[in-house]
């Protein structure tokens, strides 16, 4: 195998590796955006839950539902 052929093969492989790396980077970026959005939603839900717990009176926590 000639020197030029080997260089071309290496250039070909590097080009494909660079493209694959960019694709993986893009996927990782999108996944991080999704994780950040889920974390923000989780925090909002926790705040709502804590707010609902704080506003509940002790009597309302143990009320028997009307169907009993």
Image (tube, rainbow, N blue to C red):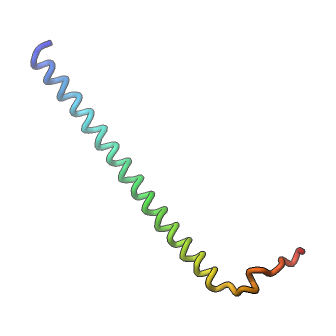
| Residue located farthest toward the right when viewing the structure as drawn | 68
Q: In what quadrant of the picture does the C terminus appear? A: bottom right
Q: Residue at x 64, y 86 (%)?
A: 55
Quadrant (top left/top right/bottom left/bottom right) for the N terminus? top left
Location of residue 15 in the rendering, given as x and y in whole percent from the top left corner: 22, 33
Q: Quadrant for residue 48, please give it.
A: bottom right
Q: How many marks?
A: 0
**12 relative position to 36: left or right:** left
Q: Residue at x 25, y 38 (%)?
A: 18
Q: Quadrant of residue 52?
A: bottom right
Check the image and name the residue furthest to the top.
1
- Residue depicted at x 36% and y 53%: 29
Residue 8 at x, y = what percent?
A: 16, 24
Spot the residue most to the left: 3
Q: Position of residue 61 (x, y in %)?
A: 74, 80
Above or below — where is 33 with respect to 58?
above
Percent coordinates x, y for residue 36 in the rendering: 42, 62
Determine whether, in the image, residue 55 is placed left or right of residue 10: right
Residue 36, relative to residue 58: is it above or below?
Answer: above
Residue 53, placed above or below residue 1: below
Identified at 18% across, 26% down, the residue is 10
């Amino acid at each position: 195998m000639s020197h030029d052929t080997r260089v071309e093969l290496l250039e070909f492989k590097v080009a494909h590796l660079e493209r694959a790396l960019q694709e993986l980077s893009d996927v990782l970026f999108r996944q991080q955006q999704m994780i950040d959005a889920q974390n923000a939603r989780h925090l909002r839900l926790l705040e709502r839950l804590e707010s609902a717990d704080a506003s509940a009176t002790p009597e309302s926590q143990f009320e028997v539902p009307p169907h009993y």
